[in-house]
Amino acid sequence: MTKESIRKILSEFNLNGSSLQWTPLTSGLINDTYLVTEDDDQQYILQKINTQVFKNAGILMDNIQFALPALKADYYSQITFLNTIAGTNHLILEDDFWRMMTYIPNSTTYNTTTETSTAFEAGRIIGKFHQLLQYSDTALFNDTLPKFHNLAFRTLEFQEALQNADTQKIEIADGAIKKAQSLLKELQYLNTSNLPTRICHNDTKLNNILFSKSTKKALCLIDLDTIMKGYFFYDFGDAIRTVVNNAPEDEQNHELINFDESLFKAFVDGLAVNSSFLTTEDKDSLPLGAVFMPFIHGLRALTDYLNNNKYFKVMYENQNLDRCLSLFDFAEKALTKKDFMAACIKKQLIYSE
């Protein structure tokens, strides 16, 4: 992006582009994000939505706007989107879709943690998010990514990619393909027919939780693009894969991938603070949900690798393969902890309310 382009975008959001500084933030895998700073140190987040992934960004913003009024409470920080000169919460400029939001000062994120206090806060704020949204009208929310966590759909995508992939890629990915097929057999026992449909974040990895630098308390969930209908185990399992495992998502040394039981217990303790909305069926789904979510992300990464990396940003050719192998390894480790998780959830959630 040129200075002139950025200044034009900022001016459309009623900001003086000539007096602002901006820095690219590179941690995201989908959107292009910039930290914008005014002379008085007021800061904002500017994002260009990846419309190849989010093909209807207007629906995406509608879902966020339906959710935001509920996400305003004590101990939950509110994110505000700036309006353009035209009065809209987004800007379409030369076919690019831009939005600007407030930046919460003195805040930070963590990719992983070894601190039980951080795990506790992650569980607490995810519970708070769901508690605040539990009475939202699900009919208002449309799927920005249809069948996002649908196992049958992701399996079909994988099988189609497998049929069409380059022979050399299939040979390189042989171990990952076998792991995928093995884990699919385990996940056939995950029953969703008796689960209540909820408004979920759908991407609750640890670095999508904002923490206070001073108090270390969780403030709110960020990256709200995937807010839509789902089941609670989506958000539970997605958080577990990054809270209890200290290794990065594309870790190649699988000996470093772990399932820290103390961090799991702390997370569930935090969730128990705001768990009154959970049904018994919700709770029963959580152990296998902690296997399902790393698996489904791994399956998507493997499918993307076989499809020549069309979805996720990659820094090198085989990064999606490394992602899927790392995620599958954690899913396998979580599977061995299923009984531990069930006992922990029964003790800390069912009897803590």
Image (cartoon, rainbow, N blue to C red):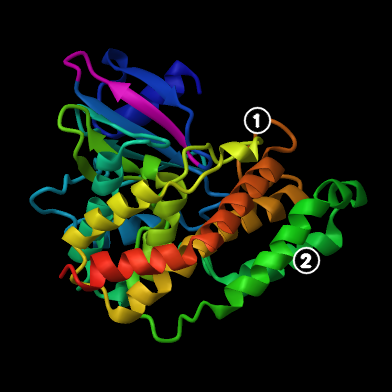
Q: Residue at x 47, y 32 (%)?
A: 27
Query: With 294 as the anchor, is 240 left or right in this view?
Result: left
- Residue 145 appears in the rendering: no
- Closer-to-camera residue (65/258): 258
Q: Which residue is mark 2?
A: 160
In the foreground, 344 or 257:
344
Residue 105 on the magenta span: no
Total numbered labels placed on residues in the image: 2
The reply, left or right, for residue 159 in relation to residue 80 is right
How far across and down, in percent of the image, does residue 239 sit? 40, 52
Query: Residue at 81% of width from left, 61% of height from top?
Result: 162
In the depicted structure, whether residue 144 falls above or below residue 98 = below
Amino acid type at circle 1 is Met
Outermost residue toward the bottom in this view: 194
Residue bounds of the magenta highlight:
31-41
Q: Measured from the top left, where is residue 332 in percent x and y?
A: 60, 57
Amino acid type at mark 2: Glu
Q: Which of the 4 quarters of the picture holds residue 58?
A: bottom left
Q: Is residue 299 above or below residue 308?
A: below
**Residue at 33% across, 61% down:** 63
Number of the label disc, if any, that sits on residue 315: 1
139 on left or right of 294? left
Q: Position of residue 117 (x, y in %)?
A: 25, 40
- What element does badge 2 sit on? helix
Measured as percent of width and height from the top left, residue 254 is found at 63, 40
Closer-to-camera residue (326/31) = 326
* Residue at 32% from the left image edge and 66% from the top image edge: 345
Q: Is residue 267 visible?
A: yes
Tell me, for residue 111, which label it has, or none: none
